[in-house]
Amino acid sequence: MSSQSAVRRTELTCPGHSLPMMAKAAASAADEVILDLEDACAVSQKVAARQTVIEALRTLDFGAKTVAFRPNGVHTPFHYRDVIEVVEAAGQCLDAVVLPKVERAEDVLFADRLLTQIEHNMGLPAGRIRLEALIESARALADVERIAACSPRLASLIFGLADYAGDIGARSTDDQWTTFAYPKHKMLVAARAAGLAAIDNVTFAFRDDEACRRDADNAARMGFDGKWVIHPRQIPIVNAAFTPTPAEIERASRIIEAYERADREEGRGAIVVDDEMIDAASLRVEAKKLAVARRAGLIV
């Protein structure tokens, strides 16, 4: 399991120039809200949107959600002012910064050190604001293991399908679970090896509930912790896909209890539950279900 305690079944992104849209996101059922200064903002709106994001962070009630903002990439002329202005003004209201267009580990380290300087200058606890890195290019995928392991601030890796497809010259993103199975799995493995959460890409057809459900179910089966969403209607579909059902929770608890009892009382390392062979390797899948349920508040 990831060492990060936050639940990230749904990461909802919303335009940083629109206070009404950010207010709707704050009131949604998403686990995390990302106030976006990058792709969701036109170039002409990027500078002014910083103040709108600051206002949202200072005035909106996000409840128990993880609250993040996405600055422009570290290779753009907007990044450093995005981070400095927003974090200096509202860093106490932020949980994470989502880094787009990460190319290599050094990009994450740059953002880490910039955040550290701001935290020291503003009297904020050093390292409290986490980082999430978007993996959305061939260069990033080639360095994904180093990226995942380079900073203790990192909480997750997120697969950015649209930019990745454009970068490698893919002709379509329609059949993503065949065409993009390799980069998804490679990023997932890197995240797991570093103890990070792994977040799958958005379903672009946001009015197609069945496509969203199919994509979320596939991502959950593969092992992702959650999924990026761009519209509130996607939230309940994605949350459901990444949340164990009551029956799954009951069975996982029963399996783990039976295994521990067999070990303690009989010294057995393999048992049969519901006509299924259970050994230590099987427990990891069941333990993850219980950990997700616990973090989601479904069990104590």
Image (spheres, helix red, strand yellow):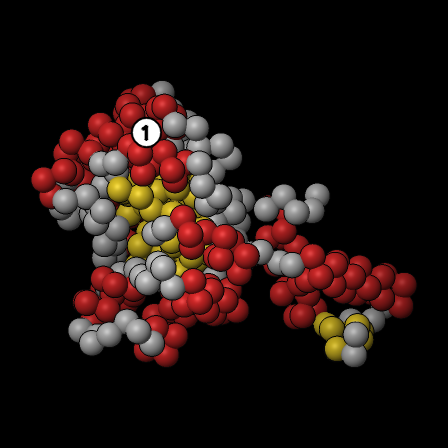
Q: Residues within 10 Å of mark 1 (few under 14, many from 20)?
A: many
Q: Residue at x 51, y 35 (%)?
A: 64
Q: Residue at x 31, y 34 (%)?
A: 20
Q: Is residue 73 left or right of residue 270?
A: left
State the residue in front, 53 or 290.
Answer: 53
State the residue in front, 273 or 279.
Answer: 273
Give the quadrant of residue 34: top left
> Can you give x and y, in whole percent of width and height, for residue 28 in the image?
45, 41
The N terminus lies in quadrant:
bottom right
Is 129 above or below relative to 212?
A: above
Give the quadrant of residue 174: bottom left
Mark 1: which amino acid? Answer: Ala
> Can you give x and y, in whole percent of width and height, for residue 259 in the image?
79, 65
Point out the residue furthest to the right here.
265
Residue receiving disc 1: 56
For residue 143, say whether it is visible.
no
Q: Residue at x 50, y 52 (%)?
A: 236
Q: Is residue 219 left or right of residue 45?
A: right
> Can you give x and y, in whole percent of width and height, for residue 107 in the image?
24, 49
